[in-house]
Image (cartoon, grey):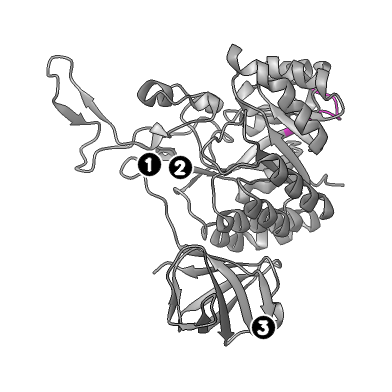
Amino acid sequence: MIKKPELLMPAGSLETLKTAVIYGADAVYIGGDMYGLRAKAHNFNAEQMREGIEFAHKHNVKVYVTVNIVAHNSDLAGVEPYINELKDIKPDALIISDAGIFSIARRVAPEIDIHISTQANNCNYGAYRFWQELGATRVVSAREMSIDEIREVRDNIPEDMEIETFVHGAMCISYSGRCLLSNYFTGRDANQGECTHPCRWKYYVMEEQRPGEFLPVEENERGTYIFNSKDLCMVGHIDDLINAGIDSFKVEGRMKTALYIAVVARTYRRAIDDYIKSPDIYRRNMEYYMEEISKCTYRQYTTGFFYGKPAHDAQIYDSNTYIKEYIYLGYIEAVEEDIITLTQRNKFSVGETIEVMLLSGENSLFEVEEIYDDKGRKASSAPHPKQMVRVRLAKGDKSVLENGLILRKKDV
């Protein structure tokens, strides 16, 4: 019997956590106010964390909290009270990379599982065994590992030691994300959660004897983005991931929108479920997965290191922009016959066609017939971000409408 892997989705806010849960995640990972590697994400205060964990647990979904900075001496004094606070909130696991923080967590909250972050750079089965002997229940594999290497790890560690692996999302130029460029250029330490993403910047070279004369690395008038990797996408290789013995499929993106979370969660959920039902069903639906996964923002796709070291075509040299086919409009907050209420995220107008993302994997089209603002006045459009509006929909099956469903429109 095929073991069904966990689908682990990111969440940078309560909105995206609930979206991940609704659209099929088995587990969600989040960051608190401190000690996580995405300081620019909205992140969760203690009250929001409680609410998010309660919502997830009601839907039988686990929540893991990142405490995965590379800690300096000045960080350690605050770790123990923070772990004590998390102990009271009761997440299902803590994601940790630093040995000092690990030892504090084991002492203060031994009842909470610990997952070792990809930042700890674990590339071999000896490291997995080491962490298990210290009390960890899971290790996130280094992103530089191949399918064959992961399979070899699985064959050489105890059955109850779990392997978590990134299968989708942005890639970093530095080894498992331990980057120094951001700190060097801006003073903001990527390993402390403040990465400025210098791998997406435009670069030139300068010859030593000709200071100030900048030359493009390639002959291109737009310069070059020599560190700018394509995004990882393994939805077309679910069979290889499962057969390698990976227990948890992890998606990158705690700073992404709810639309991104919904698209990726729903697509991987269906791909995993299809494969578990029948590899033949999975193969027949491949075109659907690839079409759907391209409806969120992305920088072209690559399989990363899974099938060997990436070649030059895994980089994007002429641009640092995302491909964006759809625009996020918001999610349904209330339904009254053919009228829905939402807090809009991007402009849409009367007469436009919008799409409702159904949990089944299908999409239902509607025409915007009328828009009412928060004072009940008719409007021709909803142009203001975070504007509460009521929308009358036409030309679609209203019975599919329910709270939490994501709304989007094609970016033309």
Residue in view at x 57 percent, y 35 percent: 307
Q: Earlier in the sequence, mark 2 or mark 3?
A: 2
- The residue carrying pointer 2 sits among few (fewer than 14), some (14 to 19) or many (20 or more) residues within 10 Å by Cα, namely many
Residue 186 in the image, given as x and y percentages of width and height: 37, 26
Residue 265 in the image, given as x and y percentages of width and height: 65, 54
Q: Which residue is mark 3?
A: 398
Residue in view at x 65 percent, y 67 percent: 405
Tell me which corner region of the image, top left, top right, bottom left or bottom right, holds residue 155: top right
The kind of residue on which mark 2 rests is: Lys
> Would you say the residues marked 1 and 2 are in contact, meaning their CB atoms lie under 8 Å apart?
yes
Q: Looking at the image, which residue sits at the far top?
A: 73
Residue 172 in the image, given as x and y percentages of width and height: 49, 33
SS label for mark 3: helix
The kind of residue on which mark 1 rests is: Ile
Q: Which residue is mark 1?
A: 316
- Magenta range is 157-163
Q: Mark 3, mark 1: which one is toward the viewer?
A: 3
Q: Nearer the viewer, residue 47 or 398?
A: 47
Residue 68 vs 358, above or below: the answer is above
Tell me which corner region of the image, top left, top right, bottom left or bottom right, holds residue 380: bottom left
Residue in view at x 68 percent, y 77 percent: 335
Q: CA separation, marks 2 and 3?
A: 39 Å
Q: Which residue is mark 2?
A: 230
Q: Nearer the viewer, residue 228 or 254?
A: 254
The kind of residue on which mark 3 rests is: Lys
Residue in view at x 59 percent, y 20 percent: 70
Q: Earlier in the sequence, mark 1 or mark 2?
A: 2
**Magenta segment, principal secondary structure?**
loop
Residue 53 in the image, given as x and y percentages of width and height: 77, 46
> Would you say the residues marked 2 and 3 are in contact, meaning their CB atoms lie under 8 Å apart?
no
